[in-house]
Amino acid sequence: MLQLTYQDKLIECGTDEAGRGCLAGPVTAAAVILPKKFKNKWLDDSKKISLNKRNELKEIILNEAITYGIAHVDWEEIDKINILQASIQAMQRSISQLNPTPEFIAVDGNKFKSYKSIPHQCIVKGDGKYLNIAAASILAKTARDEFMKEIHKEFPDYQWNKNKGYPTKRHREAIKTYGITPYHRKSFRLLPEQLSLNF
């Protein structure tokens, strides 16, 4: 089972994002503070968990967390500030929703910018090591998937209900056939031969 937190002296939140590698839609982050006695043998990196289990865990986290925040940074902002900055921005926005404010931030990945001078630690593959980061990964992933399912209704040809905006073969074929939508990230390499796309 994963450890609860990175350290145990300060009130710690875990934070993670979902959707960095997508061609369309937002990058979504979550931040979570779990109670000291929280335990769950199923909770792990959201990518390792089935859809049904993720949805079950989401409800447990929403009910049992001391506090949580979820934030989207949209495709237009991603194009302006780049995906790394947008991912950090999404994490910081999700942390800003927490009450109480954390005294320490455990960050999934290797890049973060200091937030309100709160000490932080970047942890590569942290969502497979600490429950608070794993909980954030579940909330970020499920919130983003719900968003993509909603916008799929507007543009069903791209199959975002299945691929969630990731660069699958079908998604790329749809871009080739129908062009791009307002939800596509124009700063991304949407097709291997970018020349065939006119913005």
Image: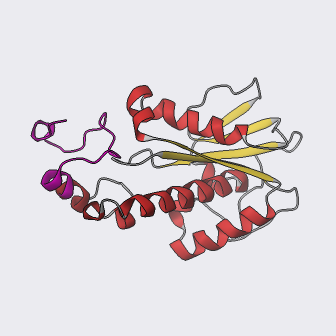
Residue 25: where, in percent of width, then height? 41, 48
Rendered residue at 50%/30% (across/down): 85
In which quadrant is the C terminus drawn? Answer: top left
In which quadrant is the N terminus drawn? Answer: bottom right
- Spot the residue most to the bottom: 52
Magenta stretch bounds = 174-199
Residue 62's place in the image compared with 118, above or below, is below
Residue 157: where, in percent of width, then height? 24, 63
Residue 8's place in the image compared with 103, above or below, is below
Residue 13: where, in percent of width, then height? 75, 44
Residue 190: where, in percent of width, then height? 24, 43
* One can see residue 186 in this view: yes
Position of residue 142 in the picture relative to residue 31 (left or right): left
Rendered residue at 67%/51% (across/down): 133
Residue 38's place in the image compared with 26, above or below, is below
Considering depth in this image, is 25 or 109 the residue closer to the camera?
A: 25
* One can see residue 110 in this view: no
